[in-house]
Amino acid sequence: MTLTEHPAPEAGGVEDPELELVRKHFLSLDESGARFARVLRDTIDQLLDGEHTGRFDWNDLHKTEKTHAGTLIEINLLREFGLSSGEDLDYLIEGIEVDCKFSQKLYGWMIPPEALDELCLVVWADDHQGLWSAGLLRANRIALTTSGTVTKKGNRDGKFRLTKQHHSLVTWLWENRPLEENLLLHLDAETRDAILNAGAAFKRSPGQAKVNELFRRVQGRRINRSVIRALAMQKDYMKRVRYNGGAREKLRREGILICGDYPNHQAVAEQLGLPVPREGENVSVRVAEAKPHHADKPSVTLEERRWVKAGPDDPVEPAPLLPETKKQSPGSE
């Protein structure tokens, strides 16, 4: 690989056939960016490692873990999209070497000397903002500034950043897209504290108490398994949701249903007018047996009775059992 300096192109100016080939390659694999977004969500959750640490906030990661994020994203993207490894850079796409750079700070990518004048896949994600972007950049030396960290050999061995006046040189594949919500991070402080502190009085099963409080307080919202993992802190963390001792059984007496990603559970959620849980998700709701004043509310028939989403004035009554198999399709009226 040879290094050839070219004048920095103006925004929207000089065409870059290689960049266009790589752009089209990614969009042909993932036009909406959904697969890319899933890799970012899963990688952040992988770093947080809620099952073993209980963490849900990027700021609680160690410095070395944050540094490792870029490597994990590079590897996970390679696997997700079936990319080939490059000889000098991370990927070989359409015969073109591409380096992958991640930063939690937008435009904060550190470009190594070996990537100068080459294509870079630049990725940004911020769990607090709930946003991510990914684009392509020709790492032209004139558009870069030397970072503050260099070796005794001089700038050639240091890394480089994109200068502020050249931010527009990034060709975005997907810009400012929503990152799947990190629920615990975005709950109001009072609700989050109540959930996290719920296990204090339960030495034998603090994780179960936290999961119960989660579904008790956070109703009508999709809750993914990473939240359960961080609260339960055990290998079989979904056990804390199921019937047979889990939240689905324990909260039933309070009138709370927890719909999972079973097809029949999804049908119940849809008929009650709730967000439909997707793979690995659950949605809780307190229900009441339908009365004449509920005539206009969405309803579902379970255990041969009609149920609606309970209002604040509806008395608490035990919830019906949810169907568990495809043969037990719920009815609606």
Image (tube, rainbow, N blue to C red):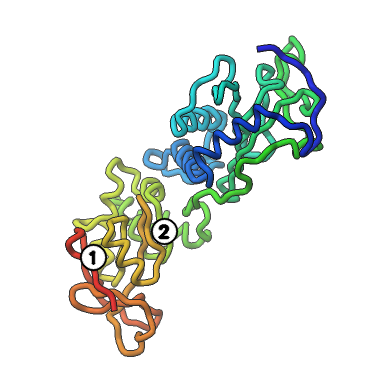
N-term mark: 1 or 2: 2
For the N terminus, which image quadrant? Answer: top right
Secondary structure of the residue carrying numbered label 2: loop
Is residue 54 toward the left or the right of residue 319 in the image? right
Q: Is residue 77 above or below residue 199?
A: above
Q: CA distance from mark 1 to mark 2?
A: 17 Å
Instruction: Give residue 322's mark.
Output: 1
- Where, by quadrant of the figure, is residue 105 drawn? top right
* In-front residue for pair 230/262: 262
| Residue 222, label in figure | 2
- Number of marks in picture: 2
**Amino acid at the residue labelled 2:** Arg
Task: Confirm or deny contact between disc 1 and disc 2 (CB under 8 A).
Answer: no
Position of residue 27 in the picture relative to residue 332 (left or right): right
Q: Position of residue 30 (x, y in %)?
A: 51, 41
| Residue extending furthest toward the top | 153
Above or below for 219 versus 205: below
Numbered badge on residue 109: none
Is residue 177 visible in this depiction of the protein? yes
Q: Is residue 125 left or right of residue 143?
A: left
Residue closer to the observer: 20 or 332 = 20
Q: Residue at x 66, y 31 (%)?
A: 109
Q: Residue at x 31, y 42 (%)?
A: 234
The residue under the point 22% across, 58% down is: 243
**Crowd rating for badge 1 (residues with CA inside 10 Å; few <14, some 14–19, many 20+):** many
Helix, strand or loop at mark 1: loop
Residue nearest the observer in this picture, 202 or 263? 263
**Where residue 124 sits: x, y (%)?**
61, 39
User: For the C terminus, which image quadrant?
Assistant: bottom left
Residue 45's x, y, as percent?
A: 45, 41
Q: Residue at x 27, y 44 (%)?
A: 236
Amino acid type of the residue tagged 1 in the rendering: Leu
